Amino acid sequence: MRRTHELFRRAFGPYVPHTIAIVLLAALGSAMEGLGISAIVPAFSFAGGQAGTAADAISQIIQHLFSFIGLPYSFRFLLFFMGVLFVLRTVLVLVIQYVTARIVYGYERDLRTTLFGNMVRAGWPFLSQQKVGQLDQLLITNTTNTSQFFNFISTLALIGTKAIAYIIIAINLAPTVAVASLLAGLVAFVGLRPLFSAAKAASVRVERLNRGMAHFVSQHVGGMKTIKAAAVEEPVERTIGEFFESIRSLFVRMMVLRGTTETLVRLFGLGFVGIVFVVMYQTPGFNIAAFAVIVYVINQIFSQVQAMQVQMHALSTMVPYIGSVFAQVDDARANREETGGGPMPTQWETLAFDHVSFTYPGRERTLEDASFEIKRGGIVGIIGPSGAGKTTLVDLLMRLFDPHKGEIVLDGVAARTVSRTAWRTQVGYVAQDSFLLNDTIARNIAFYHACSHEEIVAAAKAASVHEFIESLPQGYETVIGDRGVLVSGGQRQRIALARALVRMPELLILDEATSSLDSETEAAVHEAIDTLRGKTTIIIIAHRLSTVASADELLVVEKGRITERGTPEELLKNKDSYFAKAYGPRA
Ligand code: ADP
């Protein structure tokens, strides 16, 4: 309970003024309704030919109000007064809805911005641990549910103030009945708390299942081709079916809990009205008008209690959604990437790894004591068995991770001291399996980088993909499908290369960019590399000898260590070297 309280304060604390505004408007509306209803008693009195006199306090207030405004206190004006109040109240409800909607959707936008902004600014070690689909779920469902809080507040305010208005009317007309019905309402409210807790527990599970399901769906949609190829549609369907089934049964359970609560309150209210009728009917001086109003009022009080139950139920089922959003925001914030630091040195001469070690959490040492130097404009090839640590090495170079020991140094300046943003603006990166947007080729090459069409074309030419793009009916405006399925692997990699080149990087990293591709693409990439030779520093991770044959220096990485280095010719001379064994004449 305390934690829920803290969560609410955290989530909605800054919105206290908004909330108060909603409550005040609702209170005003309920006061109007209360006055309108109370005016029934003097109206009946007029109808009965008694000049609208009634003993109760509210009727007298109305009468005073009339003389204050200078309106004649007559049946006609009383009816008119009631009509105006009800119309005003109805319009006020619209105003409340409008104000609430502005708050709800503004809140939703802000929360989404906060969540997404913190996620995208978090560091790679944190982001690489995220499960696919979960963020979608948090951004779409959880934020919506969280912002619904204000709808609940608005509804609760309307209901609550209405309940209070009716309680005041009841006290005004028949204090004993009012106090009794108040107590009864309280008993009903407290008595039904266990049902609340059960609904909340079910909701916690639904929220978790929803995220699990979103993760499962995203993951499997991404792997649809593999699923088809392996003919495992049935077991996949069965597994997701279990999610669907669990969610179904939990929702049914929540519905039963909610329905039971509602019905119990309703039955309780009916019984209570019955008792009041019996008691009042036997009381001398029984006033039928007052009685009718009282029954209506009690009924209203119970309806409001019941409606409050429903809202509280719904609100408590929102709590887990709110909790997860804020937990995610906190996590992302705690893992925020440090972006401060100095500018990137220009015209640097050497980039060096100085005794760099790095280990993934819970793993054996991934990279150990790696030292090497690259001259500006040089080309370095990195080879070695898979799992040796090559990708980790370039990830460190992109500063996605920080070395645990040692330093990456640029002309004597520690990379640590340079702003990551400044650093990465100078790095072009092409991965093995490039990520393309479902957007035009031009936009895929520009990739949020401000550049002219000429620059895009120049980059495409450099990546040997210009002719292919021109051959498409819509040229650079051709839309590539999701994950680039409308272009071949080779074309995709060349578009990715063009994307890296358009940013004019100082440092170009190709991480097995051509490993899974045809020799034609590889040749095209080589051509691009040759034209960049001397202008851009290039690091190529490759499997094939042909890919790295033109490198100025080769580094062999084995089990996290740089075990060999030298020109391809030098390495081949040592017959026992990994390089000679893997790529030598007898290999
Ligand atoms: P390579 O590129 O040479 O194939 P990697 O640098 O990808 O090798 O991986 C080196 C080692 O680190 C492997 O044993 C791999 O399983 C492990 N590894 C890679 N990425 C992670 C990660 N995000 N978390 C934990 N271990 C990882």
Image (spheres, rainbow, N blue to C red):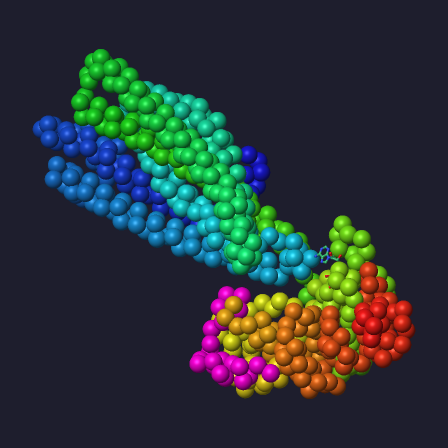
Of residues 251 and 38, the one nearer the viewer is 251
Name which quarter of the figure residue 289 lies in.
top left
Q: Residue at x 31, y 20 (%)?
A: 272
Question: 125 or 161: nearer the eye?
Answer: 125
Quarter of the rendering containing residue 69: top left
Magenta stretch bounds: 464-484
Task: Identify the residue at image location x=47%, y=76%.
Answer: 478
Q: Is residue 25 above or below residue 580?
A: above
Give me the residue at 66% from left, 81% from top. Answer: 523
- Give left or right: position of 58 versus 454: left
| Residue 566 makes an appearance in the image | no
- Quarter containing ligand 1? bottom right
Residue nearest the viewer, comparing 287 with 262: 262
Q: Would residue 472 be counted in the magenta stretch? A: yes
- The x, y position of residue 530, in whole percent, is 71, 85
- In the rendered image of this protein, does residue 541 appear above or below residue 330? below
